[in-house]
Image (cartoon, grey):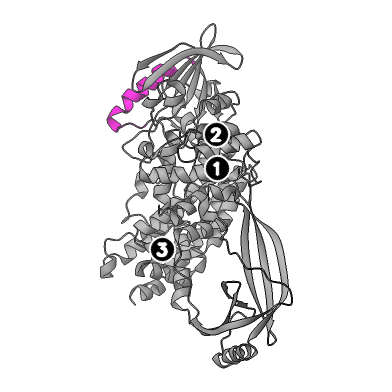
Amino acid sequence: MQMSTRRGSTEVHEFDGMFQGFSAHYKVTSVIGHVFRSDRSRRRDSELYVILQRSSSKIQPLSVGGGSRNRTEQSLDFPAAFQDWTVTDPLDLFQAPVLKTESNPKSLLILNVLNTCLLTLSSGNKAHIRRHLSQEARGSSHLVLWLDCDREGENICFEVCIFLSVIECTGFLVKEGRRVYRARFSSVTENDIMKAMSNLVEPNEDEALAVDARQEIDLKVGVAFTRFQTNYFQGKYGNLDSRVISYGPCQTPTLGFCVQRYLQITTFKPEKFWAVHPYIIHNGYELKLEWERNKLFDSNVAEMFQKLIMEDGVVEVTGISEKQESKTRPSGLNTVNLLKVASSALGIGPQLAMQLAERLYTQGFISYPRTESTAYPSSFEFRGILGALVSSPSWGSYAQSLLADGYLKPRSGTDAGDHPPITPIRSASEDMLGSDAWRLYQYVCQHFLGTVSPDCKFVRTTIEFSVGGEFLHIVGQHVTIKGYTCIMPWLAVKENNLPQFTKGEKVKISKVDLYEGETVPPDYLSESELISLMEKNGIGTDASIAVHINNICERNYVQVQAGRKLVPTALGICLIRGYQCIDPDLCLPDIRSFIEQQITLVAKGQADHCLVVQHVIQQFKRKFSYFVKQVINLINLLLQ
């Protein structure tokens, strides 16, 4: 295939090929570098879309795309008449019209693929880019859009179609009957790109409307409450001056989880407890025996049992059991689990973790990092990925052994119908990626290798004892097959070898300790725990969970402390307590879960998006009116 390249506003690559059985001339602009370049060292962090043009004798496919790692698709906002905080009554915002604007008001979004900005331009260059796109699209008959295989990707498809429909005179006019396709793919490998091109589909309007519904609800509810709270408190309470006191249908329940844990900690009342710990020495091993009663909250009773055991002085072996156990290998890696591990094990916050993952993706090192699925598709090419990892000095020999000895089929997981689990695509080194990106990439590789490795096998041995009518036991563990823990050693089963015992054998007690302890409150929520709660309660999506957590940190509602624990600030605590006093629904996850269920029905074509938006907006409008009347309760808390 001969390809020519010329420079315009972005590079345009042209070549002849076939499209749906017809001869075709392709034009590709701002393409994925490692698909269309033979020199892989000159990668570009950019994406791809395709427009196909028909001439008198053949289809002429024009591929157009662009590159930036920043997501800048259009978002909803209010018209100018509703922008003045001092003039507009926040209550009016619930019925106000909305319009789509560029996320960056100084930019014009031409096209977006893979949920990263394809082409943004400063306001001064709008005419120039319009002219460029019009020229390249002249006479076109087909448009192929390459975007994320999720609802946001579908929404951007229709934004692009709307934009191209209004290009005057010489552009691609969607409404003239020309075909629009979208390609679905999860990694920027040549095989995936070619496979996607061979399996084009039409954009899904229901999924696009679901995104519009969520955006309109979040905009109207969030801005109405935020403007009222901020205007009401500014100038009245010194330490709140000039602070935007924001509310969000996802943000506030996220903060609510953190404050709920804080309240559990501050209201916790510790209790003293006592436990009896007998010790024996057998075949050179000093062993601490576990008491079946575990612990008691009465010191006199605990001392009585200690004395009883000491007076008897000998334990008898009453039972010996061995059980073959398995620690199963992990399922495929999805976004939520990646964020949890990044925070808890790598010390990388969710926002940074997503930025690093997206960069690794656009550079072609890992597959698409936004996915809810943990199940691999039946056609997944495990051998190809293992082969790509063989050259790695870190785990190449392990990958080679899996290829030689036979890798296992991964565990069944959840197929959310979006992208496959996150996997490595090609080998890399720390020098190529940098420290944090390397650590995240390293985990992705180890997790993938773990999913196709054997389970960890071990033998659990339990020895049971009796003394003075009390029952004790000890448990030992011996690993027989390390399996996937060879490549994921932090998940290894802890070995605890025991000496040989026989049933009925009697062993002298060496000492009996009486341990005094105190119950402790739970710790502050970690980012990892918060992510789990958000996922469980339907707060946010794999694409937005990191954003919501980052928002409550940036707005000084919580602070990230050692161990990536989330500690609420005085302002965050007061806000949640105020909502709890006025209307607990405002900070509980239940309403948001209901909204997400309704939005899912819209995405499936089972509910009208206008009716869903209307119903939810009316609910929150009533809650807002009640909140305004009862706001004195929030004031009293803020003044404490």
* First in sequence: mark 2 vs mark 1: 2
* First in sequence: mark 3 vs mark 2: 2
The numbered dot on residue 361 is none
Q: Nearer the viewer, mark 3 or mark 1?
A: 1
Secondary structure beneath label 1: helix
| Image quadrant where residue 463 sits | bottom right
Q: Position of residue 102 (x, y in %)?
A: 38, 38
Residue 491 seen anywhere in this rendered image of the structure: yes
Q: In the image, 351: left or right of 460?
A: left
Q: What predominant SS class does the magenta segment belong to?
A: helix
In the picture of the structure, the residue carrying the numbered disc 3 is 566
In the picture of the structure, the residue carrying the numbered disc 2 is 385
Type of amino acid at the residue the image marks with label 3: Leu
Between 241 and 380, the one lying in front of the other is 380
The numbered dot on residue 448 is 1
Q: Could you give the CA–CA distance between mark 2 and mark 1, rounded to whole angstroms? A: 9 Å
Q: Position of residue 435 (x, y in %)?
A: 36, 45
Between 618 and 251, the one lying in front of the other is 251
Question: How many other residues sit within 10 Å of disc 3, few (<14), some (14-19) or many (≥20)?
Answer: many
Between 562 and 25, the one lying in front of the other is 562
Callouts 2 and 1 close, C-beta under 8 Å: yes
